[in-house]
Amino acid sequence: MSQTNLADPDVVAESDQEVIDVPDDSASQSAGNKRAPGRPASDAWNKFKRIPNPNPGNSKRKYLGVCKDCGQKVTAKTEDLRRHASNCTKSSKETRLASQVQQIKAAGGGDSSQLSIDSYRDSSKLSKGHNKALQRLLVLAIVMCGIPFACFVQPAMKHFLHCMRPSFDLPGLTSMKGPLLDGLYREVTVEHAKWLADSKLAQHMTLALDGWSNARMESIYSFNIIFPDRRVILLKADELSSLTHSAENIAELVVNIMEEYGPKRFIALVTDNARSMLNMRRLLVQKYPHLIEVRCMMHCFSTCMGSVMGHPYAGAIVSKAQSLVTFFRASRKPLALLKEYAKARGINGMLVTSNKTRFTSVHAMLESVLRLKDVMLHLLGTHQNLLSAGVLAVLADCELLFIGIKQICQMLVPFTLVIQAIQSDDASLADVMRYWHFLARSMDSIKPQLTDPAFKKHCIAAFNWRVGDMHNPLAQLALFLHPWYRRTASTPDTAYKGIRATAGRMWQSNNKSKDEVIALLAEMDKYRLGSTPFVGIMSDSGLDSLRSYWNSIQYTAAGSGAPLQLPALAMIVHDVKPHAADPEKTFSLMGFFRTSRRNSLLLSTTTAMTTIKMHHTRKSGSMTPKPVREIEAILQREEDLQNMQELEIAEAVIQEAQRTDAIDDCDVSSAPSVELCSTTEMLEVFSEFYDGDKQDMHGQNVDNTRIDSSVPFSAKEFDLDFTGSAEQVELPNMDFGVTTDAYDLNELLE
């Protein structure tokens, strides 16, 4: 019988024995003889005996391994053998530990005796350009994810990256924060310079600015440029801690920016309504008469929301709800039980706290308390001993408390939607009027549900006062110049006179001649009547469709002689972004990078990282935010209903004329068109909201019944100043250089 090589797994034993011992490599060859051909068996077989596989099937495994300690049969695969040896309960602790070490070494590539294709690593040398490209991508990933640079100099991270690609040259900390980050920042700034050099893109720019104090109490001002297509760049962020934040000093900084890039390229200045910012805007408008000053409408809607909530009734409910949130978030066992019971009932989301500077957080806090109402009442009945005396006092009259929370939540829902929607990139000044209309209708529908009479009167008075205080004639003009919401003969004469006056003053401020203003007013009359060339329609109400409409009007009339004035005015009005949320987002990103653990970052480094992240996260053609869709759906239902009612009236007029055979003599112009939505109510939204409870800005009813004003409209919990705009100040003398022709606009309006 020929000698059988038992070390070769492909050789089938010719003897009748069932179990085949795997010999050591030293025993498989005699001294002085060559080792038998074939790959040596893995050391994983040291703990197993090999037997033929009676049913190999599709596995193509001719053998099975039988554990020498427990007798369990294991597939003859190295990974399976090692796994069983590491976990065999019959083996000694030392044997299991040795097997675990072998398993770890094999998984990390340490077992060089047997490598699979999965263990292959590309160790080829990287070219210099490829290595630099990988380093650039690494720094970009660090910036986009907000990972500290120091993480990539830790031994574990360096070992991990070396195992992935041994030939990759990992840059040091100084290189990542220095040349590599500067290179990325330079690429972004070069791209921004191209945008600013584009005469078509950068002709109607909006400048937005705001101030912020970081964790180190450094006062930082952010200056953002917003293009007509809503691209945003962080122009610069200055640390102004040593500078007095007066209107004159801030105005000087803005003037330097505008003179650098050209004042005529800027059409608007957007800030919040702090006193220094308000006075600064007035200074800039006097120096640059064509500049449109816009107070941030996001802050305006938030202020209106806070004023409506500024009543003792609402303040008491918010205070009680916040006390519940504070107790549970600070108590270990009650919070654990709250989570357990909420999970058992299938309730998602836990209690959230509120922020006095963000009124939408008050709404979120109240909703979280209302959502966990049943869980809190269950804890009150089963674990009353765990609750504090303050919580027990709050929950003593829980039914009235939760009824009040529900009413306030219903009232705050439209405000939250509007505040979120106005921050959309597609938001325009026309949307401001739309959202005031939405809030007015929402307040009107919620009014009957408010059970406290004093709070109801306060809500109406505070809302009407804020609407009148924040009235912007430019928003009325923007809505009028939005073809999607326009309908011929629907604008009241009184409102239209104000719109014409606003347009005339704006065109005069843009240094237009008398003939150009006359042409503008004539074109507005044609546009109102739907005459040529203002007869087109829009595909949708979006900003891109709006700009395409007016561009097409201007292009169509380009070959007919003098250019039209109204399309140029409409493009300026609609290119204004009505909020200063972009500086707020800039500060949020700065806070994202400069945390309590990374407070040593220089402002220049933070600015560079913020600029890079803002540039690379910019999305073109993003979807319409959900709050915008919800508001538009509600308003569209109202307008569809109104259009259906007016269509029935129009058909009735025509049918009556046909019945009397006087169709030729019938004045069908009184039948309203249904091509586009009505703007009548929207243009009158600032004058009348409620028929039965109309009140003036001081809370005076129509029937001269005085509202109790012993408590100011702003509750102490919200820290609001309900005194209107900042006081009128005497502005310093500046060289304004106005070159507008001297003509009386009132004569033209007549």
Image (cartoon, rainbow, N blue to C red):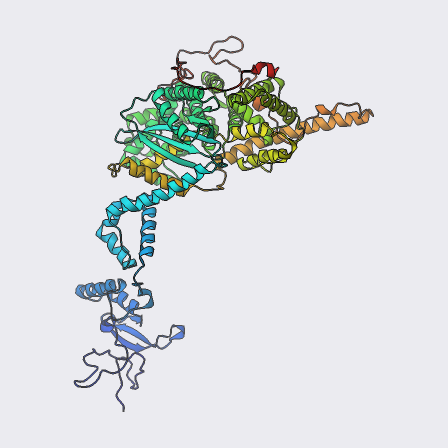
Q: In the displayed structure, would residue 503 be above or below residue 352?
A: above
Image quadrant holding the N terminus, namely bottom left
* Quarter occupied by residue 83: bottom left
The image shows residue 652 at horizontal and vertical percentages of: 74, 26
Q: Residue furthest bottom?
A: 1
Residue 552 percent coordinates (x, y): 60, 36
The quarter of the picture where the C terminus appears is top right
Q: Residue at x 54, y 23 (%)?
A: 512
The answer to whether residue 346 shows anywhere in this view is no
* 191, above or below 156, in the image: above
Q: Position of residue 738 (x, y in %)?
A: 47, 19
What residue lies at 79% left-to-right and 25% top-to-bottom? 657
- Give left or right: position of 91 versus 289: left
- The residue lying toward the viewer, choosing from 381 and 308, is 308
The image quarter containing residue 194 is: top left
Q: Is residue 467 found left or right of 586 in the rendered image?
A: right
Q: Is residue 225 visible?
A: yes
- Residue extending farthest to the right is 661
Q: Is residue 355 left or right of residue 602?
A: right
Residue at the location (46% across, 27% down)? 268
